[in-house]
Image (cartoon, rainbow, N blue to C red):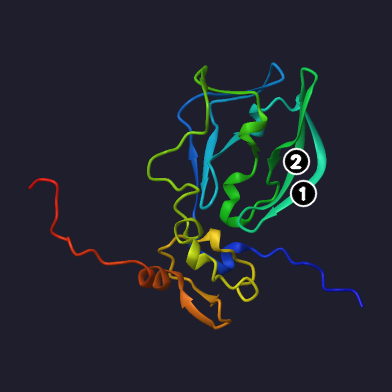
Amino acid sequence: MAGSPKVDTNGWINNPDYEIFFDAIPARVRIVFGGADIADSSAAKVMYELGHAPMYYVPQGDVDMAFLEATDHDTYCPYKGHAGYWTVRAGGKASENAIWTYGSPHREMAGLKGYLGFYWGRMDAWYEDDVAISGPREIPGRIDTTNQFKCLFPDLAAQWHGERNTGISAYEFAPTSGTVVWWRDGDGREWQESIRARVLAATDLRTDGDAHPYG
């Protein structure tokens, strides 16, 4: 008997508080590979997503598609949707599946449509206003890979019940999330509790609450 077809779950249903920001970059962004300008845009954006490093996206109209070759590679993000990929070829070099787009993104991320994302390390050089840059821009106050629940509280994340928490993962949540999920400890005990409650129970209260640096 054939198994049931896999259903791609929309992550926003189970985790409506998930955080993704899609911010404009106030600079002209130029991306170089194999000696060629693959993209040149004054409308590029940077994506900040819980548990991920910043990613640069460029409008497709600002990408030289002559250097791109579509592949059959496909990935699925529960918060953005299915991504289709291109291999980039220039100057006798190739970088496989280095550029992607969400052709029909989830409604919550509709603004992604028409943008191409680039793996930073698979390009040869990046420029902002013709100044070479060594990494994606981090806008203060936005999220990064270090402030998600799984990273800050690895011992608690180890008790995440992977079988009962269907369609969601520990990395997708902030420590302040009030989402109630399933837990399982080393003794096999299973229970439901919010992430925030578990974090509060695992942290300490300081006894020097009146201390300040001014004497």
Q: Residue at x 52, y 31 (%)?
A: 135
Name the residue tied to disc 2.
85
Q: Is residue 149 left or right of residue 104?
A: left
Q: Position of residue 165 (x, y in %)?
A: 60, 72
The kind of secondary structure element at disc 2 is strand
Which residue type carries mark 1? Asp
**Mark 2 is on which residue type?**
Tyr
Q: Residue at x 64, y 59 (%)?
A: 78
**Residue 130 placement (x, y as % from top left):** 52, 17
Kindly report the distance in space between the C-alpha atoms of the residues bearing marks 2 and 1. 7 Å
- Residue appearing at x 14%, y 51% in the figure: 212
Callout 1 secondary element:
strand
Check residue 74 in the rendering and tell me which mark sits there, or answer none: 1
Closer to us: 29 or 215: 215
Residue 90: where, in percent of width, then height? 76, 21
The reply to whether the C-beta atoms of the residues labelled 2 and 1 are less than 8 Å apart is yes
- Picture quadrant of residue 126: top right
Between 136 and 30, the one nearer to me in the picture: 136
